[in-house]
Amino acid sequence: MMNRAEEDYIKVIYELTIERKQELIKTTELSDHFGYTDQSVNEMIKRLESKKLVAFIPYTGISLTKEGEIIAIKMIRAHRIWEVFLSEKLNFSWENVHQDAEMLEHVSSPELLDRLYHFLGQPKYCQHGNPIPDLNGNLEESAHLRLTDAQVQDTFKITRVLDSKKLLSFLNEHHIKLYDEYKIIKIDSFTQTISLENKSKKHQISMNIAKMLFGYIVV
Ligand SMILES: [Zn+2]
């Protein structure tokens, strides 16, 4: 049996591995992420290692074992299915689904999740554009190209955003939505801003924000 904290660690190791495109995660990255001390992170890693869910190479980093990865995928699947349910059926806004999904993912039986998944029409992505693993645990690759990777004159389609409350509230304020397309008008390295527009909107956003928006160049 696993407790909630253990499940959260497994999930975060998986997510950081994907997000940072790293094979190994350092314990300091976990302490930064959770805001815990290095000592408590180290204790947890030892515990997960003894359960054969992670492999730890001192001074190098942590990776999930096959079994750890199966658990991580189950957790993110539950999380994202609940996010779809909360936003599509209960009208939660995208900046407000995270916390409830975070609780629900730990208390859902496999049967409940399967029924929910079918009830929702087997969705492929959550409201933030993160892929939802299918029944066999297979999932599409996450969009990795950042808006900051685009060039002037490119048309960029946003297909994934970082699930951060501050970012999502900013996007709401500026009416920027998932699957919006924008043409890059100007990249200003001095002010660290990117100017974008489409038929109905014009924006100037900071590189910091642009780094949290992912998608592809429309050709
Ligand atoms: Zn999400």
Image (cartoon, helix red, strand yellow):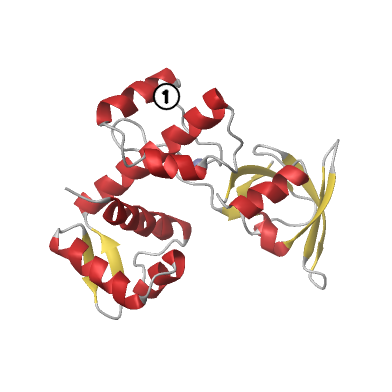
Name the side, left or right, on which 201 lies relative to 112.
Answer: right
Q: Position of residue 23 (x, y in %)?
A: 35, 64
Q: Position of residue 213 (x, y in %)?
A: 63, 51
Is 109 located above or below residue 172 in the figure?
Answer: above
Q: Position of residue 159 (x, y in %)?
A: 60, 41
Is 95 located above or below residue 135 in the figure?
Answer: below
Q: Amino acid at mark 1?
A: Gln
Query: Can you identify the residue that label 1 sits on?
Result: 122
- Mark 1 Cβ and ligand 1 under 8 Å apart: no
Name the side, left or right, on which 42 lies relative to 128.
Answer: left
Q: Choose between 14 and 82: the one closer to the eye.
A: 82
Is 36 located above or below residue 4 in the figure?
Answer: below
Q: Residue at x 64, y 54 (%)?
A: 166
Res. 195 visible in picture: yes
Q: Choose between 158 and 2: the one closer to the eye.
A: 2
**How many circles with numbers are drawn on the protein?**
1
Q: Secondary structure at mark 1?
A: loop
Picture quarter with the C terminus: top right
Q: Residue at x 14, y 58 (%)?
A: 51
Res. 140 visible in picture: no
Q: Choose between 168 and 179: the one closer to the eye.
A: 168
Q: Residue at x 24, y 51 (%)?
A: 3
Q: Position of residue 170 (x, y in %)?
A: 71, 50
Name the side, left or right, on which 164 lies relative to 66.
Answer: right
Specify the farthest residue to the bottom.
59
Is 206 located above or below residue 213 in the figure?
Answer: below
Q: Choose between 194 and 206: the one closer to the eye.
A: 206
Q: Residues within 10 Å of mark 1 (few under 14, many from 20)?
A: some
Name the side, left or right, on which 196 lies relative to 28.
Answer: right
Q: Residue at x 13, y 63 (%)?
A: 50
